[in-house]
């Protein structure tokens, strides 16, 4: 929106300017009224332009302020979204951490218990092997005893038969 500034026409300027004998140009007295009119007009145009510039400046400032307000609102909204994302990323972080700590604690307790179980299993196996060995030895001894008892009975019966025959022959 530009307002047109009246520009003096070349013909008017020629009429206003009068050449003096020294060669310099001077303005006639008519010029002062027209000059005043032109000055007022130029001043008026200048003020109008200044007001227009100021008005546009205010509009831009208002738009910038409005934009800044929207930016601040968006910043707050994004901060809230970030917080929600952080909590959403691991809503049970505390519970998970607690369970992991308990698992670690149980693992620490399990290690010596596992070693104890292995030791006791080895002791049990050793004791079972010793028991089985002794049991085999006992079975062998019982078998030997049975053989000896059977042999002894056989020998005693033989002896008794011989003694019995010897008594019968002596009669």
Image (tube, rainbow, N blue to C red):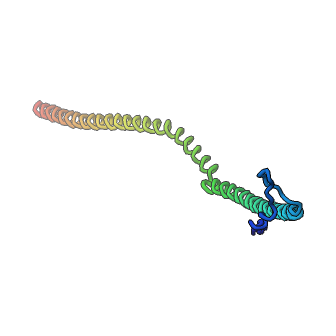
Q: Quadrant of the N terminus?
A: bottom right
Q: Nearer the viewer, residue 2 or 66?
A: 2
Report the front residue among 132 and 92: 92
In this picture, residue 112 sits left or right of residue 69? left
* Residue 156 drawn at (x, y percent): 20, 33
**Image height check: is 52 above or below 83?**
below
Along the viewing direction, whichever of 115 and 90 lies nearer the viewer:
90
**Occupied quadrant, residue 76:** bottom right
Question: Which is nearer the eye, 124 or 146?
Answer: 124
Residue 62 seen anywhere in this rendered image of the structure: no
User: 92 above or below 121?
Assistant: below
Query: Residue sitting at 53 percent across and 38 percent down?
Result: 108
Q: Is residue 29 left or right of residue 165?
A: right
Residue 106, position as x, y percentages in the image: 55, 42
Evaluate whether residue 166 shows in this view. Answer: yes
Q: Residue at x 78, y 66 (%)?
A: 8
**Could you say which quadrant of the image residue 91 lies in?**
bottom right
Report how many numbered discs are placed on residues in the image: 0
Name the image quarter holding residue 38.
bottom right
Q: Position of residue 40 (x, y in %)?
A: 87, 63
The C terminus, quarter of image = top left
Residue 109: give x, y in percent of width and height: 54, 39
Farthest residue to the left: give it. Answer: 169
Task: Please report the residue visible at 82 percent of the width from the left and 55 percent of the height from the top.
Answer: 26
């Amino acid at each position: 929106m530009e307002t047109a500034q009246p520009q003096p026409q070349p013909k008017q300027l020629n009429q206003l300017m009068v050449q003096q004998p020294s060669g310099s140009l001077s303005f006639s007295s008519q010029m002062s009224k027209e000059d005043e009119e032109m000055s007022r007009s130029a001043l008026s145009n200048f003020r109008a332009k200044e007001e227009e510039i100021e008005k546009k400046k205010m509009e831009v400032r208002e738009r910038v302020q409005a934009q800044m307000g929207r930016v601040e609102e968006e910043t707050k909204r994004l901060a809230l979204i970030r917080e929600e994302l952080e909590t959403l990323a691991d809503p049970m972080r505390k519970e998970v951490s607690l369970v992991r700590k308990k698992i670690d604690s149980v693992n620490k307790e399990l290690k010596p218990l596992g070693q104890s179980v292995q030791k006791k299993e080895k002791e049990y196996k050793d004791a079972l092997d010793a028991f089985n060995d002794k049991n085999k030895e006992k079975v062998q001894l019982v078998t030997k005893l049975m053989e000896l008892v059977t042999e002894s009975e056989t020998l005693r019966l033989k002896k008794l038969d011989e003694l019995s025959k010897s008594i019968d022959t002596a009669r």
